Image: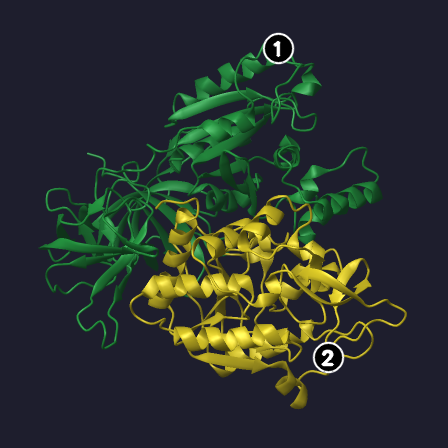
Chain colours: A green, B yellow
């Protein structure tokens, strides 16, 4: 059975937590003790209905303030698929948590309140989905019950969104009119919107095609750990463990190790469940080579005729996430990219992206918390990387503040502008 | 053979290897409970044919089911890993914590002190735990790499962003990380793994008959450490345990499931979460787990 990771993005006002509660409730994934608990709390607070958002808002501060502070992960399954939900907060100050939740998902759901239409927050969330390269986007126009299930409302919001989205890099966008509170088009088809002929949300989640989302062409294997048993029964075993970041590794393949440029042949691939003949993106394996080369953590195994870029001068979209200090050009940070750690300076802010208007603001040399900009970086050691749009795994990095240890920035590597 | 667990196994193995590569002194918490058993098996597979490059540690309240301790010792012997035992009894004897008494007393909360002392004593900087996000609401918000300050405290409002598959384990002297490689596994996934890879577990996970009394609608096992409540009726019942913790606060469920397949069938239709059904410690307050986690609990 396949597993789909998806993020839900929006604020409490959009009914996001209610939507998740609805998916869990209607797919019978809520346990009785959880339901009893939220029923009791809803009753105590005097709510008219069971507040399904209480299922996801787990921390005390969240329940007290009625907001979602941090990403919450939820799990449910239908006979067709297993799902991992990353429930992301929508408030602007929690942009970093949204990026956390949406960075490695297959699909993102952005909610729009049918009464308010596309608002600044919708634009910001969609931009982030686009920047993060999330392969599939679902726009749920929620609270259709409050606009009399009016088809025109839905069509107008759709047109408004499409006009804005034409300037973004979104691959696959699906629009759904729903009411999370009333249950319309979430798990079961709505009798209130006969004009809508598309699928329900759950049907879409169960059937969206994700098998072609991975890069299976450009072979990339960042070496994570060298396995050398100090055991008499395995005197010569020397394996390179890691997770396939792109392409396919096969026994018999001729490979090149970077940065050394030495070549060898794959003689075996061990997986956690036994030897395999090939390994595809996402698989954690140990690769055995014919020759005894000097290979360490941070090296990259690829094909001789298809190599990643290698450079100490980088260009990236950088989202700043440190609330204690802005990004300072010239300051030395730690950078972690695949399995490699180096030090880096951010040399220049080419522009800051206005996430509402999408305009490029120049003449700026800092990025504050939640700001996104195109920057250049200089690293102490060459990185082996691809354009983020070609390969999310070899195209992403994090910036760490060396003093506080905080994850201060998240970057997506891009081809230099020519 | 490809199974639904492949992505989960790959993710967990990657996390375990990353910690071994980046931290100086990792340790894996091993109680003999099913989640820690699965985690240990994944660690074995992550480094095979080499041995696991870190020890395992059990925080022992002294109030154990004997079947679990017997299993624990057999398991570490077979796998050739080093076992460290952090003893709550020793913490009590040294005066660091006071033992609890009374009819509902449980040493479960005392484990936090022993755990933090053991981490400090051995200077562990990464502590693998078998917690899953589907277990409990506070856990649902926790990162895979969960930072702890020098008091062992978790600050849920100030968690580091965790993006893509890149983990940030940078820490200062005296701080440590709790690492949760099974974050994205569900109870059903755990049982599916146990079934598919024929993983041995303590016998009390499977249906057996033992003396039981009822407390707050929970089925409590009569043991040396837990005499029946006054006025309660002790019956011989067929039960199994969905979680295995301190014998004084872990309840059983009525069950005839004697094989993994029986349990998977039962779990698939279970209507109550495993903690809701069987953990008296989580019933203490609405934020029971959050409060304990903040101060350094597992």
Instruction: Evaluate if marks 2 and 1 touch, with contact meaning CB atoms under 8 Å apart.
Output: no
Q: Chain of mark 2?
A: B
- Say which residue appears at 63% left-offset and 81% top-offset: B88
Residue A401 at what x, y percent from top left? Answer: 40, 60
Q: Total number of numbered labels? A: 2
Residue A15 at what x, y percent from top left? Answer: 65, 32
- Say which residue appears at 75% left-offset and 66% top-offset: B220
Position of A122 with respect to B2 (left or right) is right
Of tags 2 and 1, the one toward the viewer is 2
- Say which residue appears at 61% left-offset and 68% top-offset: B297
Give the position of the C terminus of chain A as an image quadrant.
top left
Closer to us: B166 or A185: A185
Q: Which mark is residue A194?
A: 1
Residue A72 at what x, y percent from top left? Answer: 57, 47
With respect to residue B181, does B229 lie above or below?
A: below
Say what secondary structure mark 2 lies in.
Answer: loop
List the residue tagged with mark 2. Answer: B224
């Amino acid at each position: 059975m396949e597993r789909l990771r998806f993020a839900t993005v929006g604020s409490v006002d959009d009914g996001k937590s209610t939507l998740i509660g609805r998916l869990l409730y209607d797919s019978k994934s809520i346990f009785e003790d959880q339901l009893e608990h939220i029923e009791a709390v809803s009753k105590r607070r005097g709510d008219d209905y069971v507040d399904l958002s209480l299922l996801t808002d787990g921390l005390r501060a969240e329940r007290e303030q009625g907001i979602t502070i941090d990403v919450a992960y939820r799990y449910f399954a239908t006979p067709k698929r297993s799902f991992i939900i990353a429930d992301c907060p929508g408030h602007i100050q929690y942009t970093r948590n949204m990026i956390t939740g949406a960075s490695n998902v297959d699909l993102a759901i952005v909610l729009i309140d049918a009464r308010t239409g596309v608002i600044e927050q919708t634009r910001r969330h969609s931009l982030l989905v686009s920047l993060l390269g999330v392969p599939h986007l679902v726009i749920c126009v929620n609270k259709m019950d409050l606009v009399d299930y009016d088809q025109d409302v839905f069509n107008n919001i759709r047109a408004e969104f499409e006009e804005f989205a034409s300037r973004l890099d979104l691959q696959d966008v699906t629009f759904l009119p729903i009411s999370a509170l009333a249950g319309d088009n979430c798990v079961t088809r709505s009798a209130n919107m006969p004009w809508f002929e598309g699928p329900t949300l759950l049907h879409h989640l169960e059937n969206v095609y994700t098998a072609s989302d991975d890069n299976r062409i450009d072979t990339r294997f960042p070496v994570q750990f060298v396995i050398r048993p100090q055991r008499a029964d395995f005197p010569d075993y020397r394996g390179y463990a890691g997770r396939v970041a792109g392409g396919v590794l096969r026994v018999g393949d001729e490979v090149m190790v970077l940065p050394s440029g030495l070549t060898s042949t794959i003689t075996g691939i061990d997986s956690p469940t036994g030897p395999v003949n090939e390994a595809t993106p996402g698989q954690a394996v140990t690769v055995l080579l014919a020759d005894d080369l000097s290979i360490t953590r941070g090296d990259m195994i690829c094909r001789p005729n298809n190599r990643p870029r290698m450079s100490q001068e980088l260009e990236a979209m950088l989202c700043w996430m440190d609330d204690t200090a802005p990004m300072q050009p010239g300051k030395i940070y730690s950078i972690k990219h695949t399995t490699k750690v180096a030090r880096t300076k951010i040399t220049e802010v080419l522009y800051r992206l206005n996430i509402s208007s999408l305009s490029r603001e120049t003449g700026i040399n800092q990025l504050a918390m939640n700001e996104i900009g195109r920057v250049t970086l200089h690293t102490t050691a060459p990185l082996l990387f691809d354009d983020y749009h070609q390969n999310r795994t070899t195209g992403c990095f994090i910036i760490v503040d060396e003093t506080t240890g905080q994850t201060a920035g998240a970057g997506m590597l891009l081809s230099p502008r020519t | 053979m490809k199974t639904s667990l492949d992505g989960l196994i790959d993710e967990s193995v990657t996390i375990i290897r990353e910690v071994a590569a980046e931290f100086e002194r990792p340790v894996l918490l091993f109680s003999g409970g099913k989640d820690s058993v699965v985690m240990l098996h994944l660690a074995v597979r992550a480094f095979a044919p080499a041995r696991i490059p870190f020890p395992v540690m059990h925080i022992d309240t002294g109030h154990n089911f004997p079947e679990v301790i017997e299993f624990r010792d057999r398991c570490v012997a077979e796998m050739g890993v080093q076992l460290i035992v952090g003893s709550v009894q020793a913490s009590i004897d040294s005066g660091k914590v006071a033992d609890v008494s009374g009819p509902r007393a449980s040493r479960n909360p005392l484990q936090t002190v022993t755990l933090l002392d053991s981490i400090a004593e051995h200077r562990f900087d990464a502590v693998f735990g078998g917690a899953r996000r589907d277990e409990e609401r506070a856990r649902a918000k926790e990162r895979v790499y969960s930072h702890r300050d020098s008091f062992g405290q978790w600050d849920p409002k100030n968690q580091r962003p965790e993006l893509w598959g890149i983990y940030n384990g940078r820490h200062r002297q005296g701080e440590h990380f709790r690492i949760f490689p099974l974050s994205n596994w569900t109870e059903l996934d755990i049982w599916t793994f146990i079934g598919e890879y024929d993983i041995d577990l303590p016998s009390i996970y499977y249906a057996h008959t033992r003396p039981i009394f009822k407390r707050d609608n929970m089925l409590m096992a009569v043991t040396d450490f837990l005499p029946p409540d006054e006025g309660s009726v002790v019956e011989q019942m067929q039960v199994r345990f969905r979680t295995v913790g301190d014998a004084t606060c872990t309840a059983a469920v009525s069950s005839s499931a004697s094989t993994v397949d029986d349990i998977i069938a039962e779990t698939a239709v279970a209507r109550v979460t495993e903690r809701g059904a069987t953990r008296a410690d989580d019933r203490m307050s609405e934020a029971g787990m959050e409060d304990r986690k903040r101060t350094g609990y597992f």
